[in-house]
Amino acid sequence: MRLLLAEDDPDLSRQMKIFLEDAGYAVDVSLNGEDAHFLGETENYDAIILDLGLPVIDGLSILRKWRDAEISTPVLILTARDGWSEKVSGLDAGADDYVPKPFQIEELLARIRALIRRAAGQSSSELSIRGLTLNSVSSKVTVNGMPVRLTAQEYKLLSYMMHHPGKVISRTELTEHIYNQDFDRDSNTIEVFVTRIRKKINLDIIKTIRGLGYQLVAEEE
Ligand code: CA
């Protein structure tokens, strides 16, 4: 899962990036509104964290532009503690949730998980398919109750697939959702990750769809 973090306070954004990466997300950071607007419009994110007080273009204007351009990525806005009118304008402009500053990082993480879950049409933080279970809170993966050790990239890839069961997902799409923009992306590595994941989970659940990509098969065939 990949996030855009638009926050102009350099210390805060640095800290948040570390926490979000530790929690298993690929993260792009924008320190101003122009950059944030551009990235949100051109890259594929699973959720966006948007500070409303950004230089160049303010958060609310960016959000309106995105929604006008029919970009439906879930957006969580960061608001001032007592800014009730900001929260109302933000939600009306198309924000999906808000967190007032200052906040506990755990609350932000929980809200991001919920946003991504809802956007994928999932109601539980524990995703289960045919004995394979992924807990998005603890980042633990099990097969029939037995823990499976995945690397950070393998986890990101499996998490994206488990949020979209049954969907045929191209390598490009997987690449876009597990790496941040600074990463030297190579879609061939996706094949390597999938092979390793298959070996580790030892379940016939990730199907290769020739020429199109991969599909997590929810039903036994
Ligand atoms: Ca700010």
Image: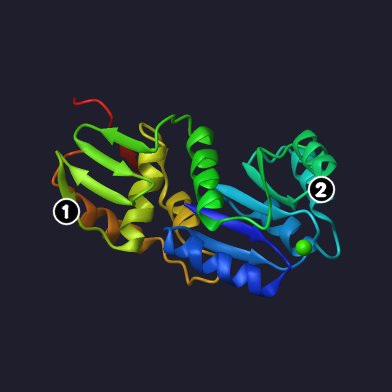
The circle on residue 60 is: 2
Viewer-proximal residue, 110 or 167? 110
| Tag 2: amino acid | Leu
Q: CA distance from mark 1 to mark 2?
A: 44 Å
Q: Which mark is residue 200?
A: 1
Foreground residue among 57 and 9: 9
Instruction: Please state if 204 lies on the left or on the right of 8 as rendered.
Output: left
Secondary structure beneath label 2:
helix
Q: How many numbered badges does the structure rendering display?
A: 2
Query: At label 1, which amino acid type do we have?
Result: Lys
Residue located at (57% from left, 70% from top): 15
Residue 144 position in % (x across, y down): 14, 38
The answer to which image quadrant residue 129 occupies is top left
Residue at position x 47%, y 58% in the image: 25
- Mark 1 beta carbon near ligand 1 (under 8 Å): no
Q: Residue at x 65, y 40 (%)?
A: 97
Place of residue 45 in the rendered image (x, y in percent of width and height, measured from the top left): 57, 50
Label 1, residues with CA under 10 Å away: few <14, some 14-19, many ≥20: few
What residue do we see at 70% from left, 63% from top? 7
Answer with the quadrant where ligand 1 appears in the image: bottom right
| Residue 168 percent coordinates (x, y) | 39, 37
Mark 1 touches mark 2? (CB < 8 Å): no
Looking at marks 1 and 2 on the same chain, the residue that comes earlier in the sequence is marked by: 2
Where is residue 167, by image quadrant?
A: top left
